[in-house]
């Protein structure tokens, strides 16, 4: 299937660049987490999970709302899969409660959680059953009449565009087709909550992008709440309405993709999502205009200026996070004496529409700057060993306290 | 050249130690018994020349085979062997499946130890192990002593020299041949399949019948053949543990050879036994082939 047919309805024909803004709010103003009157469909309440001495999930409290496409993001071993498996019922929390639809399901076995279904990493398709029997498996467990099963199976297979493979065995299918069978098998049960454990991890990059759109389409069409576990930040940014970034069993930040990218709360989150340059410094002044003056830990005496946040004190160590695309790179020294770093170009990566510049600053840091190769540039091209200045606006950096 | 040698060795082995002996046995089965050394006639002698051999081939006939088919003793011995082998195979499966299942579900670090326990009996001679069962099963044996002391029974059970003892002996002796292929197929099953079944609303015992059991069928088939095929021709166990009522073709064959000294009939019995077994052996090969193909 093609990308354009994957994007249905309102989004048809939108350029890839619009993806993020669309998915961050599937319907305009879709932000139930901001509405205190809404009750979440899923609530983790002070959930801790230990395996022996290892704390996989550390006292997590998290609300997920109906129709959300919620991503649990983090490196392997951060506890994201454990959290998902507790929702499915395969792991029992050591402490705390899992509440779904106001009902405490902490002690329910997986087969008793009829409104939650999971799509497994590497799919876990039954190798001895045809595609059709795989998809109908969950319905047969309910003792549903045969014709109704047939109808629901056809429906689910049509949803993932898999109809003509009904009588094949899983090993006769390609990876992408298997992934769709796994999706159809879970969705055939019409769960209220769908769990996806690294659902696209086994696909190559091109197929993965298509599959992401398909997941989004299916999530919107069925109105199911999706919870996805992934270590791929791009994937999380693409599909999710909100992302929870996890680190060592704790939630680092739970926000929309846009907020996570533009306003990370810690160096960990900033570094995990996309490329970022982190610069350390000390607070020297807090002018009344709501900015903060910072002296870099190592530098030429120029100060950095950023938008202040609450709870800052003179002398405190802070970090500035600047995305590569926020830098303005030039061969001439800028007039302003604020937010300027001088350096030498180590490397240039030409990527067609944009170029990456790895700059070795006078202070001894390596930073990455990014510049769009817009046409008709009259400037001389920046090249290796050029001395350059990097400058960024006061509001383009994010001040991080941890 | 070296490649051919590698391929040739097993074939030479088969020809020397299976095919040639088989043709000798087959030839004897077509001969007449006689009180002489060897106890059959004609005897081919290549030094007497081609004409003599041609004349002697004319003396061969299938009379012993028609004799075997006409005498009810042999057909019932074949049928009884097949029945005893089939029943013991089924009993072995019933005992081996839970064992293999337990092994496959045991913690990883335990599995090699459990595997060793299954193989451990092979370290003792098969014959000695069967003899040991006599000590357990006889009227004044360990089993009866135990049951009498516990007060479960007041009279010793007669197990020794019955078909029951033969079943016990076969099930015991061939258990590892069932456990090992079962374990191999159960151990291969991805645990996530069972999680998926549970997630889709199937309680664990239903998931067993819908997922684990069908996926272990190749192991069941392999194990059943590995037990059934040798059990049909079993001689030692019915001879040592069974009584006069236990009719098995291996025993008949033995008494034909050593008691009656009727080599041609004994050879004909052996050839027919081979034919009887070829069907399940071919079936086994076919099942193995299919399992390999299903596993990609």
Image: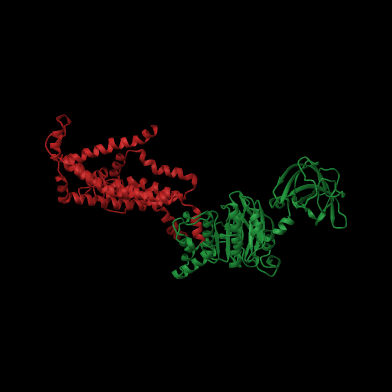
x, y (%) of residue B197?
A: 49, 59
Instruction: Between residue B235 and residue A381, name the one nearer to us.
Output: A381
- The image shows residue B122 at horizontal and vertical percentages of 36, 40
Specify the colour of chain B.
Answer: red
| Camera sees residue B202 | no
| B203 w.r.t. B112: above or below | below
Colour used to depict chain A in the structure image: green
Residue nearest the observer in this picture, B116 or B215: B215
Relative depth, front residue between B278 and B9? B9
- Tell me, yes or no, if residue A287 can be seen here: yes
Residue B184 in the image, given as x and y percentages of width and height: 42, 47
Question: Quick check: B166 above or below B200?
Answer: above
Residue at image location 77% in from the left, 45% down from the top: A381
Near-viewer residue (A4 or A94):
A4
Kindly identify the residue that appears in the image at 24 percent across and 39 percent down.
Answer: B22
Q: Quadrant of residue A30?
A: bottom right
Image quadrant for the N terminus of chain A? bottom right
Residue at 78% of width from left, 50% of height from top? Answer: A377
Residue A109 x, y percent position in the rendering: 52, 61
Position of A76 with respect to B266 (left or right) is: right
């Amino acid at each position: 299937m093609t990308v354009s047919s994957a994007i249905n309805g309102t989004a048809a024909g939108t350029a890839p660049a619009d993806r993020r803004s669309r998915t961050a709010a599937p319907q305009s103003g879709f932000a139930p987490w901001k509405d205190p009157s809404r009750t979440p469909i899923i609530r983790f309440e002070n959930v801790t999970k230990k395996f022996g001495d290892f704390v996989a999930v550390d006292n997590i409290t998290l609300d997920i709302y109906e129709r959300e496409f919620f991503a649990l993001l983090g490196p392997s071993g951060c506890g994201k899969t454990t959290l998902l498996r507790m929702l499915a019922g395969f792991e029992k929390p050591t402490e705390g409660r899992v509440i779904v639809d106001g009902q405490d399901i902490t002690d329910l076995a997986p087969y008793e959680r009829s409104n939650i279904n999971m799509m497994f990493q590497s799919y876990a398709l039954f190798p001895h059953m045809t595609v059709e029997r795989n998809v109908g498996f969950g319905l047969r467990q309910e003792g549903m009449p045969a014709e109704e099963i047939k109808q629901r199976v056809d429906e689910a297979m049509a949803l993932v565009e898999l109809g003509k493979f009904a009588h094949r065995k899983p090993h006769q299918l390609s990876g992408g087709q298997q992934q769709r069978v796994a999706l159809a098998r879970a969705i055939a049960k019409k769960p209220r909550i769908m769990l996806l454990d690294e659902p696209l991890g086994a696909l190559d990059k091109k197929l993965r992008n298509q599959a992401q759109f398909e997941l989004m389409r299916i999530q919107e069409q069925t109105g199911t709440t999706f919870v996805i576990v992934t270590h791929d930040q791009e994937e999380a940014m693409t599909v999710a309405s909100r992302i929870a970034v996890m680190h060592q069993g704790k939630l680092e930040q739970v926000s929309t993709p846009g907020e996570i990218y533009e306003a990370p709360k810690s160096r960990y989150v900033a570094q995990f999502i996309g490329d970022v340059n982190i610069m350390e410094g000390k607070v020297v002044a807090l002018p009344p205009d709501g900015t903060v003056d910072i002296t870099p830990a190592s530098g030429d005496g120029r100060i950095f200026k950023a938008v202040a946040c609450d709870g800052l004190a003179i002398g405190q160590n802070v970090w500035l996070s600047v995305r590569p695309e926020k830098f303005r790179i030039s061969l001439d020294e800028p007039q302003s004496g604020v937010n300027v770093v001088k350096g030498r170009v180590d490397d240039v990566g030409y990527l067609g529409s944009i170029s990456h510049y790895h700059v070795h600053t006078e202070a001894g840091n390596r930073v990455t700057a990014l510049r769009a190769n817009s046409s008709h540039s009259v400037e001389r091209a920046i090249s290796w060993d050029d001395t350059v200045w990097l400058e960024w606006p006061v509001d383009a950096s994010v001040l991080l306290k941890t | 050249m070296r490649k051919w040698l590698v391929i040739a060795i097993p074939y030479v082995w088969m020809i020397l130690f299976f095919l040639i002996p088989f043709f000798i046995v087959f030839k004897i089965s077509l001969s007449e018994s006689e009180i002489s050394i060897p106890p059959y006639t004609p005897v081919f002698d290549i030094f007497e020349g081609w004409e003599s051999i041609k004349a002697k081939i004319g003396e061969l006939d299938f009379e012993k085979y028609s004799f075997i088919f006409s005498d009810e003793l042999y057909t019932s011995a074949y049928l009884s062997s097949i029945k005893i082998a089939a029943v013991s195979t089924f009993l072995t499966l019933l005992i081996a499946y839970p064992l293999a299942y337990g092994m496959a579900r045991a913690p990883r670090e335990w599995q090699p130890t459990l595997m060793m326990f299954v193989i451990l009996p092979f370290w003792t001679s098969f014959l000695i192990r069967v003899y040991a069962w006599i000590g357990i099963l006889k009227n004044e044996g360990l089993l009866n002593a135990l049951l009498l002391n516990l007060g479960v029974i007041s009279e010793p059970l007669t197990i020794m020299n019955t078909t029951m003892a033969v079943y016990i002996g076969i099930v015991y002796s061939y258990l590892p041949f069932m456990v090992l292929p079962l374990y191999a197929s159960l151990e291969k099953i991805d645990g996530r399949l069972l999680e998926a079944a549970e997630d889709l609303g199937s309680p664990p015992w239903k998931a067993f019948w819908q997922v684990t059991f069908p996926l272990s069928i190749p192991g069941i088939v392999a194990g059943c053949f590995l037990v059934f095929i040798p059990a049909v021709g079993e001689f030692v166990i019915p001879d040592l543990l069974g009584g006069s009522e236990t009719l098995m073709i291996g025993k008949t064959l033995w008494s034909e050879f050593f008691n009656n000294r009727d080599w041609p009939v004994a050879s004909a019995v052996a050839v027919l036994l081979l034919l009887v077994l070829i069907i399940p052996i071919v079936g086994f090969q076919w099942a193995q082939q299919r399992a390999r193909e299903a596993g990609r």
